[in-house]
Image (cartoon, coloured by chain):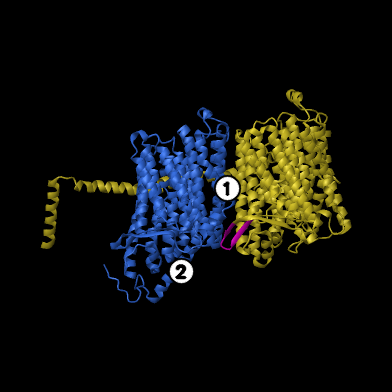
Chain colours: A yellow, B blue
């Protein structure tokens, strides 16, 4: 068994980055495309090989790790650059490299007209390196390297078209909001070191139950969760993700849907031992997840930019994943990470294909009736829409059902209810997106109509592959299996550690009822949406005028950005100005210059006594003598 | 050991080179820069044994030289290095070389004198790091001031005289108090042992009553705090940086500021440990204020150099916080921050210098869209910005992380407040970067800007290498500094115990404990 290749999984994309940097424009477009895609596909092959090796091991030995080098060792604190492959990271690494490969290939078509083609793939490869480091890290600090690394690439790729001020602004916003989360993550990590003496996963998890107080572990996990809300765009740090749509669409698919934003869920699942020790934190996670899922879904109802709808949908689906974690069903959360990666990447790539075909139009009010003109895009998008809506026997159905089931079974009835309502909303806004884009009368401008074309094969093939995955990807998680489904069985060695993996059973009948309910609300959402937008478009307009206030609230995204700006950003800049102009310039420098002026003034007076005239000196001597004389006389 | 007085050679070679460059005939005015670069390069190569031949774990100091200097008062010419000073000396020789190389086209008048000053400054800085005699330390400490003062005052910008005088007076104000403290300590030392000496090791051996320590500590700490610079005595720094020529700013940021934190580790902390213990919370909170304050004020600076200067206040706050944590992680983090701040902030000033040379402005508002015209510059700018933000994988992260970890282990609240600096640094650096590099080109003058020349790329190459090397493989650096830091920590604790014991034996009577049979004569 040659495990030493683990480091090469993130290493290959990094090597491609370096080659790209060294050769520069000599690579040409073709060379760049082959290099970038080749590195990622090779990483996928390596990952597959490693995972097969892992699967060949007996269940309790599925834990490959290797130390590359000592990163820092100070006193008793030591942390290595070390990689770990276990069933959990195996799922992640396959999703990341697999979906990553498809998106890379797609991007060679999508970005083919961009003058900064090479820079794009440089960033994209760098992202793969960071993301793979994140999921393969063997300790929290190396995970943090990947964690901030993907944040950096996200920053660079959102701001890829840097000449657009809005893109540069959105990139910066993403980075800073993420940094707020990272602040929490870092403090959480410090708590882990001080309590357990290590940041290495195994050591932290084995020590945690013995060394942590209940309050300590609650605080530590809350801080780590703050990090997750930043990376995975949850309340209160979700505001950066919709703005991130300024980036090229393949970026939205790869980073802001399939991989990076799920890092928070992965981190929680990885740390499930800690979170299970802190029931209060779990409660917070579940509630935040449910609230985010609902809030983002409602905003999604009223957006008209195709990518923004998908962005809010992503925020909402991420909320489902946290819901799962919060009710203790980490496996279901990761399952949803996987299926979501398939259908959401597909949705974004499909949207990209539409945007590409429409010469960079993203506004759904100017689309419509595209189904016949873009047959492949339409077909695959339709599959993805059904998958995310939760229509039976597609990938999203299984994973969403799993989450709702876990919420109910663990007694979180309120969370379950939120999930059911969210599912209905999801079906509604996704159908709306589908109808506005592909159905109904064409609202294209004459110009757009003229240029309309189906995308090249490099873009269509990934769509088809992802569509297949969106159909079959869920069957690893078939319900009604004895002792949990295949996916859960695979994750079992990781998620059972800590002995908390409570398996709540409900009766067959209740399980059927739950499934029927979730299918029911999905179909309800679809039908309502079809009715409002396709069969009787007047309904939508009527609803809009009837609930104008609500509609405005949703269109304006609850004014969260505006509130943050007024409450946080502007006062902060004001304080900065004041500190500089008043405190620094007036108070401190005033004092310093005051000392200078006083000395100067003092010396100016003293100077008078030393003017070089003998007469003056003689006068002072005389005065002095007289003074002494008077003194002694008394 | 090397067969030559190695450290002396390192200190005096740049000084000799400075004199030679200064007295070059007029017709060498143009080529002075080449000679100076050569000298700085030789000096850097000559300093490499400080890396390769240092035995970090060996106790005490290495490459020691110890000669009589002023026998009547026992002042000695005593040089030596340990892991701490060796690394700082390497930083000095590297950054001096880079500063000299960077100035090739920016200094147009009196270039012989300019390079002579840079080299003389190098000699002063190395002497300060190497010397182990307090009087000699004071001499070097003050000697360093003069070339820096002239660099700002002669080759500086518009308000150079104000800035130079401010720099000089601020530093003098602190160091005068330090001189008084040194002389008083000397007196005490003579009483204690009967043998006059300014030797650092003899001061290390002398316990001092805790009540008295406070005054000495404050005198030393004040001098060093100004140099660091700690809030609120930092206001000389933005002015000095703004007015200084690029090379001066680079040296000022990269090395001179480290004199302050070095002074704390080497002198103020181990010599007066009981006073330190009393002041630790105060200094820690002042450092934390510095971290936040520097970052907050950096946010709204319209001038690139001022922004970087205030970011230095913030970063040096991390340095001091690490020291106040008084544990292995904090110390190592502080030392790593010193090194990486030297590299990153030095690089930032160089980058500002590059565009200043092309546009003769440092106002952020005068730029925008530079990526379009200067892609290589912008890419390097990006890497350095990220290193300054402390992105994991760059040098800045290692130091910041260890400092915060150390602080956390000592006091939760220290780390919690200081860690906001991590968010703030991203705010002000990325906002600045966005305004300079991203967006469309709004000023026509920027459209024709040339990208980095080969010489400029050479200037940045070693710095970029260090940014990633220290970020991904900091262990060689940590291995070199740790034994020395551990010893300092241990010495501080030991001395604290010994000095505290004085009080129990003779409370309030004696300032220092005299060994039995002490024949020391009073002056």
Mark positioned earlier in the residue sequence (2 or 1): 1
Is the residue marked by circle 2 packed among few (<14), some (14-19), or many (20+) residues within 10 Å? some
Residue A36 belongs to magenta span: no
Residue A196 can be seen in this image: yes
Where does the image place residue B162, in percent across and percent down from the top left? 36, 42
Q: Quadrant of residue B204?
A: bottom left
Q: Quadrant of the C terminus of chain A?
A: bottom left
Q: Give, as a single range, the part of the protein colored magenta.
A: A72-80
Residue at left offset 50%, top offset 33%: B366
Nearest to the observer: residue A324 or residue B137: B137
Q: Which is the main secondary structure of the residues drawn in magenta?
A: strand
Q: Taking B290 as reference, is A143 left or right? A: right
Q: Chain of mark 1?
A: B
| Near-viewer residue (A231 or B17) | B17
Along the line of sight, which residue is nearer the eye, A521 or B14?
A: B14
Q: Residue furthest right?
A: A509
* Residue placed under numbered mark 2 in the picture: B494
Above or below: residue B454 compared with residue A390: above
Counting other residues with Cα less than 10 Å from the Cα at mark 1, is it few (<14), some (14-19), or many (20 or more)? some
| Res. B80 image quadrant | bottom left
**Pointer 1: what residue?**
B468
Q: Chain of mark 2?
A: B
Q: Position of residue A35 (x, y in %)?
A: 70, 38
The spot of residue A70 in percent (x, y) is: 61, 56
């Amino acid at each position: 068994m040659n495990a030493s290749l683990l480091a090469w999984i993130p290493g290959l994309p990094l090597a491609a980055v370096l080659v790209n940097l060294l050769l520069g424009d000599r690579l040409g477009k073709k060379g760049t495309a082959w290099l970038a895609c080749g590195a990622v596909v090779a990483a996928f092959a390596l990952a597959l090989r490693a995972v097969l090796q892992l699967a060949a091991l007996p269940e309790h030995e599925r834990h490959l790790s290797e130390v590359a080098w000592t990163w820092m060792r100070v006193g008793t604190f030591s942390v290595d650059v070390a990689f770990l492959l276990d069933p959990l990271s195996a799922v992640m690494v396959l999703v990341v490299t697999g979906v990553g490969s498809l998106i890379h290939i797609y991007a060679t078509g999508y970005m083919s007209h961009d003058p900064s083609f090479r820079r794009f793939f440089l960033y994209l490869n760098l992202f793969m390196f960071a993301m793979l480091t994140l999921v393969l890290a063997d300790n929290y600090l190396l995970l943090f390297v990947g964690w901030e690394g993907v944040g950096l690439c996200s920053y660079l790729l959102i701001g890829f078209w840097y000449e657009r001020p809005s893109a540069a602004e959105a990139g910066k916003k993403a980075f800073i909001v993420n940094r707020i989360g990272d602040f929490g993550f870092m403090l959480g990590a410090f708590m882990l070191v001080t309590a357990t003496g290590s940041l290495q996963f195994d050591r932290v998890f084995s020590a945690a139950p013995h060394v942590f107080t209940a309050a300590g572990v609650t605080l530590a996990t809350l801080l780590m969760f703050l990090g997750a809300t930043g990376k995975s765009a949850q309340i209160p740090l979700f505001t950066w993700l919709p703005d991130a749509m300024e980036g090229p669409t393949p970026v939205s698919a790869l980073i802001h849907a399939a991989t990076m934003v799920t890092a928070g869920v992965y981190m929680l699942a990885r740390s499930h031992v800690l979170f299970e020790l802190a029931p209060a934190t779990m409660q917070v996670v579940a509630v935040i997840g449910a609230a985010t899922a609902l809030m983002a879904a409602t905003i999604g109802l009223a957006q008209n930019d195709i990518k923004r709808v998908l962005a809010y949908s992503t925020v909402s689906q991420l909320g489902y994943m946290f819901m799962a974690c919060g009710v203790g069903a980490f496996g279901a959360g990761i399952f949803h990470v996987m299926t979501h990666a398939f259908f959401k990447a597909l949705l974004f790539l499909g949207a990209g294909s539409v945007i590409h075909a429409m010469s960079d139009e993203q506004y759904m009010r100017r689309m419509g009736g595209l189904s016949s003109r873009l047959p492949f895009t339409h077909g695959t998008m339709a599959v993805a829409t059904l998958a995310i809506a939760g229509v039976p026997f597609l990938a999203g159905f299984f994973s969403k059902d799993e989450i709702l089931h876990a919420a109910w079974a663990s007694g979180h009835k309120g969370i379950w209810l939120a999930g059911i309502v969210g599912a209905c909303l999801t079906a509604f806004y996704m159908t709306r997106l589908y109808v506005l884009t592909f159905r109904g009368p064409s609202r294209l401008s004459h110009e757009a109509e003229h240029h309309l074309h189906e995308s090249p094969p490099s873009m269509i093939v990934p769509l088809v592959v992802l569509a297949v995955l969106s159909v079959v990807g869920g069957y690893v998680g078939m319900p009604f299996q004895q002792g949990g489904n295949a996916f859960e069985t695979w994750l079992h060695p990781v998620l059972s550690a800590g002995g908390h993996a409570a398996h709540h059973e409900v009766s067959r009948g209740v399980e059927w009822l739950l499934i029927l309910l979730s299918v029911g609300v999905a179909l309800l959402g679809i039908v309502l949406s079809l009715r409002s937008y396709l069969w009787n478009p007047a309904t939508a307009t009527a609803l809009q005028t009837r609930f104008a206030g609500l509609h405005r609230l949703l269109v304006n995204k609850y004014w969260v950005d505006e509130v943050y700006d007024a409450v946080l950003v502007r006062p902060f800049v004001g304080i900065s100005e004041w500190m500089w102009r008043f405190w620094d310039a007036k108070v401190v420098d005033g004092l310093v210059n005051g000392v200078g002026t006083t000395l100067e003034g003092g010396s100016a007076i003293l100077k008078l006594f030393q003017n070089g005239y003998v007469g003056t000196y003689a006068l002072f001597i005389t005065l002095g003598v007289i003074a002494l004389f008077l003194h002694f006389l008394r | 050991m090397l067969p030559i007085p190695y450290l002396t050679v390192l200190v005096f070679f740049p000084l000799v080179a400075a004199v030679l460059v200064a007295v070059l005939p007029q017709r060498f005015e143009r080529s002075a820069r080449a000679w100076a670069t050569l000298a700085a390069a030789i000096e850097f190569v000559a300093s490499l044994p400080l890396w390769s031949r240092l035995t970090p774990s060996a106790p005490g100091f290495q490459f020691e030289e110890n000669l009589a200097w002023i026998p009547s008062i026992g002042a000695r010419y005593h040089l030596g290095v340990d892991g701490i000073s060796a690394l700082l000396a390497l930083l000095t020789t590297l950054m001096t070389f880079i500063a000299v190389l960077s100035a090739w086209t920016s200094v147009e008048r009196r270039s012989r004198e300019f390079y002579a000053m840079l080299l003389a400054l190098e000699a002063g800085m190395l002497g300060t790091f190497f010397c182990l005699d307090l009087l000699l330390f004071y001499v070097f400490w003050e000697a360093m001031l003069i070339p820096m003062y002239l660099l700002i005052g002669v080759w500086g910008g518009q308000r150079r005289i104000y800035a130079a005088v401010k720099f000089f007076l601020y530093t003098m104000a602190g160091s005068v108090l330090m001189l008084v403290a040194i002389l008083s300590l000397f007196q005490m030392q003579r009483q204690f042992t009967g043998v006059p000496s300014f030797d650092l090791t003899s001061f290390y051996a002398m316990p001092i009553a805790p009540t008295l320590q406070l005054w000495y500590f404050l005198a030393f700490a004040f001098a060093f705090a100004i140099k660091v610079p700690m809030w609120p005595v930092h206001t000389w720094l933005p002015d000095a940086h703004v007015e200084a020529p690029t090379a001066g700013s680079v040296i000022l940021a990269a090395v001179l500021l480290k004199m302050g934190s070095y002074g704390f580790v080497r002198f103020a902390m181990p010599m007066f440990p009981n006073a330190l213990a009393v002041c630790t919370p105060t200094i820690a909170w002042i450092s934390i204020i510095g971290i936040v304050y520097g970052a907050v004020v950096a946010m709204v600076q319209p001038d690139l150099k001022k922004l970087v200067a205030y970011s230095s206040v913030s970063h040096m706050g991390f340095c001091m916080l690490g020291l106040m944590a008084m544990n292995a992680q904090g110390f190592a983090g502080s030392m790593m921050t010193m090194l990486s701040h030297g590299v990153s902030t030095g690089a930032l000033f160089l980058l500002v210098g590059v565009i200043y040379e092309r546009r003769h402005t440092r106002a952020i508002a005068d730029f925008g869209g530079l990526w379009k015209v200067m892609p290589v510059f912008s890419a390097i700018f990006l890497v350095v910005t990220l290193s300054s933000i402390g992105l994991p994988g760059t040098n800045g992260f290692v130091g910041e992380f260890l400092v915060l970890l150390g602080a956390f282990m000592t006091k939760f609240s220290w780390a919690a407040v200081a860690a906001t600096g991590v968010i703030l640094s991203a705010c002000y650096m990325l906002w600045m970067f966005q305004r300079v590099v991203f967006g469309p080109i709004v000023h026509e003058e920027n459209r024709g800007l040339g990208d980095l020349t080969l010489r400029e790329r050479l200037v940045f190459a070693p710095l970029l290498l260090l940014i990633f090397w220290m970020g991904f493989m900091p262990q060689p650096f940590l291995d070199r500094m740790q034994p020395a830091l551990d010893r300092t920590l241990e010495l501080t604790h030991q001395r604290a115990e010994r000095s505290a014991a004085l009080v129990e034996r003779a409370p309030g009577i004696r300032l220092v404990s005299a060994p039995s049979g002490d024949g020391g004569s009073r002056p």
